[in-house]
Image (cartoon, helix red, strand yellow):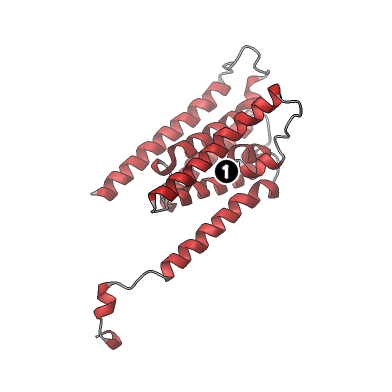
Amino acid sequence: MNDSRDQIASFVAWLAWMAAQVGALAVFAFRVPLSARFPEPIEDAALVGVLVTQSVLAAAMGRGLLRDWRTYAFAISGGVPIAILATLLSGRPAGESVGVVVVLSLWLGVMAAAGAVRVDAVRAAGQAVLLLLTAGAPVMLYFAHEFGRRPVAADGVIAVVSPTLGAIAAAGKSFPLKSMVLPAALLLLAGVLALVRRRSKPATLATLTQAPGGK
């Protein structure tokens, strides 16, 4: 019963996530200005707007959207085509979406791994950090550019730790190594920990009472 409820909740979260992405894409497709001084042409910012929407909402939804590897695959199947469409709408060749898709997929995998953690406190802490890096880093970058004395490079060190800025910095790069290092390392660590946990799983009562030879 709980599994059915979890699946329904994940599907509803996925629908909401997809609706937000389509809405963001529509805003730029219909050239809706988001501010009085929004740069022209408006659709050139479609990729950035969609990536911000995808990353921030995925981190904010956390386990609701990405609770395991099945929901992760579901999210990728919906998010990647939207990212490619946003790339085309921005006036970029479709090939420039390769790096974006790679980095986005890696970070969504990290979010899925965080959502799969069974210890509530650890899971909550991990998801809070991911949300901070995803939504907080772009805001800090904005304030640094607006009010700071020394502008911060959007594709610098901050792009290494922020899913949002990492995906944006990967646009036009087929192998964005700088943006890939951290999420790939975190995924590798999550895989190793899952393997160790599986191998150290205590024997069940059935295996303890089973007679030698399987009889």
Residue 200 rendering spot, x and y as whole percentages: 41, 70
- Other residues around mark 1 within 10 Å, as few (<14) / some (14–19) / many (≥20): many
The answer to whether residue 160 is left or right of residue 200 is right
Q: Nearer the viewer, residue 41 or 151?
A: 151
* Residue 136 seen by the camera: yes
Residue at the spot x=35%, y=71% of the render? 202
The answer to whether residue 152 is left or right of residue 164 is right
Query: Which residue type carries mark 1?
Result: Leu
Residue at the spot x=54%, y=27% of the render? 25
Taking the view exactly as shown, the residue that stands out farthest to the bottom is: 213
> Residue 63 appears in which quarter of the rendering?
top left
Residue 132 rendering spot, x and y as whole percentages: 54, 37
> Residue 16 appears in which quarter of the rendering?
top left
Residue 67 rendering spot, x and y as whole percentages: 40, 48
86 over 111 or under it: above or below: above
Q: Nearer the viewer, residue 38 or 141?
A: 141
Q: Which residue is mark 1?
A: 104
Residue at the spot x=41%, y=48% of the render? 121
Taking the view exactly as shown, the residue that stands out farthest to the right is: 150
68 over 150 or under it: above or below: below
> Residue 124 appears in which quarter of the rendering?
top left
Residue 75 rendering spot, x and y as whole percentages: 46, 43
146 over 128 or under it: above or below: above
The answer to whether residue 213 is left or right of residue 93 is left
15 over 33 or under it: above or below: below
Q: Nearer the viewer, residue 54 or 192?
A: 192
